[in-house]
Image (cartoon, rainbow, N blue to C red):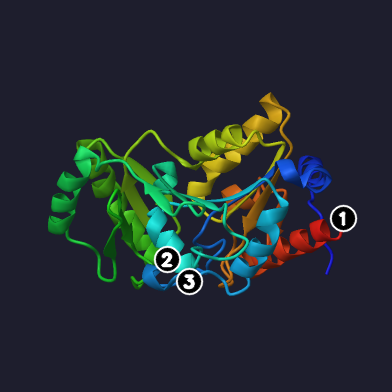
Amino acid sequence: MALPEPHTAAGAAGLAALLKDPTRAVVGLDYDGTLAPIVADPEQARAHPAAVPALARLAPLVAAVVVVTGRPAATAVRLGGFADVPGLEHLTVLGHYGLERWDAATGELRAPGEHPGIAGLRADLALLELPPGAWIEDKGHALAVHTRRAAVPDAALAELDAPLRALAARHRLAVEPGRMVLELRPPGMDKGVALTAFLREREAGSVLFGGDDLGDLAAYDAVDGLRDSAGLPGLLVCSAPATGEPPVAALADRADLVVPGPDGIAALLAELAAELADR
């Protein structure tokens, strides 16, 4: 297989820069829907079987690989199977949109204290009448209300939108919408802020970022902004749903490359590793 070609000039420039000088390239990836298939039970969202082997081959050839996820960092590490993998010694996982950080080199997890609004939100959500099939995922530093199991997920999500936004305002929390989910979390941090800080830390010469849902738009914005303001070459990849659903239009319309879900992401990572290993 050959590397897929980006359909934009900016994406082609980003891929060319990565291939020309991989030692300064950062590969950033979302977890759910990108490295792992979307499933009804988030606790069963294991990384695609080809993803971690591909990352382990690619990581030693680039400056850094970072997973930027709304999950708690420890949960992403556990479900992804990222710990103690040869080749992934310098993987970083930024959890809760960047509030938490796990470094494979040390196994250290850094996390802030709980936002004061989370406890109050947790209590209020326990009293909220949810549509049938909707359920609450407690992420520790955030709470998410899922409607994927509801009879009509989009209608259930629309029904919950106003009350959840009111609760977020009451407890001074941000609302993060996604496919069949609304997450309430501390404000001030998002995937764009987290990715930008990481790129500066690593003095990146290029960046690839892959995501699949609305929470990844902030990272897209960050890459676009750095392409414009700092001349940093970047490649934006959209992971289209593997379920036959259309990709999130807000991402697909801006992506330089659209691939078929975690299958496509794993294949892209493997092809990048093979291309760089041959150079």
**What secondary structure is found at the residue carrying circle 3?**
loop
Quadrant where the C terminus lies? bottom right
Q: Where residue 271 sits in the image (x, y, percent)?
A: 77, 63
Q: Is residue 238 left or right of residue 68?
A: right
Query: Which residue is at 24% across, 43% downward?
Result: 114
Residue situated in front as seen by the camera: 208 or 87: 87
Q: Amino acid at mark 1?
A: Arg
Residue 117 drawn above or below residue 33: above
- Label 3, label 2: how far apart the Cα atoms are: 9 Å
Residue 35 drawn above or below residue 101: below
Is there CB contact under 8 Å for labels 2 and 1?
no
**What secondary structure is found at the residue carrying circle 1?**
loop
Mark seen at residue 223: none
Q: Quadrant of residue 118?
A: top left
- Label 1, label 3: how far apart the Cα atoms are: 32 Å
Q: Nearer the viewer, mark 1 or mark 3?
A: 1
The residue beneath circle 2 is: 78
Q: Quadrant of residue 137?
A: bottom left
- Graded by Cα atoms within 10 Å as few (under 14), some (14 to 19) or many (20 or more), the crowding at tag 2 reads few
Query: Which residue is at 51% across, 59% downward?
Result: 31
Q: Nearer the viewer, mark 3 or mark 2?
A: 2
Query: Which residue is at 60% across, 65% downward?
Result: 86
Q: Is residue 21 left or right of residue 77?
A: right
The numbered mark, 1 or 3, whose residue comes first in the sequence reads 3
The residue beneath circle 3 is: 46
The numbered mark, 3 or 2, whose residue comes first in the sequence reads 3
The residue beneath circle 1 is: 279
Please indicate, yes or no, whether residue 180 appears anywhere in the rendered image: no
